[in-house]
Amino acid sequence: MVKIEDLKRIDILRDMPSHILEIIAKEARVQILGKGTELFHAGHRNETFYMMTMGQVALKLDLTRDIDVTFENLQGGDAFGLLSLVQDAVSSYSAVCQEACEVLVLEAPRMFELFEQNREFAFYMIRGVAKQYQRLMHKRANMTINTIKTNPDLQSGMEEVGVLPRTYSPLHI
Amino acid sequence: MKIETALLKTIDFFSDAPNAFLEKIAHIARVENYAAGQTLLEQGKPQDKIYMVADGKLSLSSRLADGREIALDEVAQGSSIGTSALCEDTAPQFSVVCAQNCTLIVISIKDALELFSKDYDTGYHMMLVMVDRFRREADNRTRQFLRSLKNYPGIYSTLS
């Protein structure tokens, strides 16, 4: 069983009620991962939800066959593999350990069983995932805005070839 | 009075949602008419409602740090504004004004959160809908950035 204090250091779990954390503590297990381990690959189904306690994990996407782009470097307190908790969803990124890492893991099939048995638990877990995606969505919108701010001459060219949207609003979902 | 679930289905946010879930949402949603020029959300000010466009058009604008006001976007029938507030209590980063006379589906955030705290099944489904919408938007932006990067490798520095 994982300690509740360790779970409280994970950002996505920070405002969860203690009875929900107790469920997670019973289900989570600690895993040590070596540098260079690929935990899941973009476009594939991943069945594990990860919470970082130590180390660094890069979220990457392939730009070409030979070049990949690192979008995030995750550290202690971050969670990833979020879409493992959504039925049939595939990973948006590949995740690779940049150094030796310690993670807490939850296996998705067991989580789905618990979601069916306990909708309160399901609500809090998926609300946590929604919050993370909301932040990611804003981060990506700001990335587009920063691209244009730092390279204003690129805007019209990129719009013309459909690379950037004609408007670049923060998200209005 | 409860609104028709068929009307909720015309909103992109709910287009794939199951009927039983929409029935619950229909009980807390209202249809309201707004005149052109009416302000719905103000940048940086607390937000208490979610708006969904049944008919009409909304304008989004943002005031920059240097005081300039920039038009961001126009959203039309089927769009939703402000649903992010259901998972995190943050003030909107933009203002929203009716660009035309509008018919809107309006949901009070307080009513929605009350519903979710009593009915976790509905809350769970709402959060799944939100994850799906947020993920699609984040993935679209990521793909746009990757396509930009192929043409303009110098923009990689904006990632940091």
Image (tube, rainbow, N blue to C red):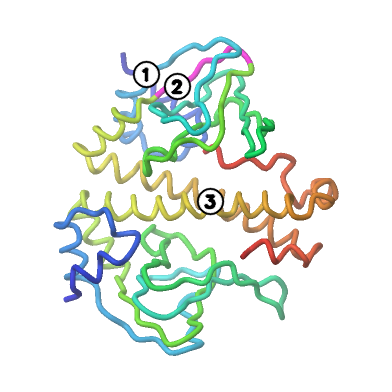
Mark 3 → mark 2, Cα distance in angstroms: 24 Å
Judge whether B101 appears above or below A169 on screen: above
Say if residue A48 shows up in the picture.
Answer: no
Q: Specify few, some or many for label 3: CA neighbours under 10 Å numbering under 14, 14-19, or 20 or more.
A: many
Residues at discs 2 and 1 in contact (Cβ within 8 Å) = yes
**Which residue is labeled 3 in the image?**
A137
Mark 2 → mark 1, Cα distance in angstroms: 9 Å
The mark found on residue B105 in the picture is 2
Q: Magenta segment, which residues? A: B100-106
Judge whether A158 appears above or below A70 on screen: above
- Mark 2 residue type: Ile
Q: Specify few, some or many for label 1: CA neighbours under 10 Å numbering under 14, 14-19, or 20 or more.
A: some
Of callouts 2 and 1, which one flags the residue occurring earlier in the amino acid sequence? Answer: 1
- Mark 1 residue type: Ile
Q: Chain of mark 3?
A: A
Judge whether B129 appears above or below A65 on screen: above
Which corner quadrant holds the N terminus of chain A? bottom left
User: Helix, strand, or loop for circle 3?
Assistant: helix
Which image quarter: residue B100?
A: top right
The mark found on residue B3 in the picture is 1
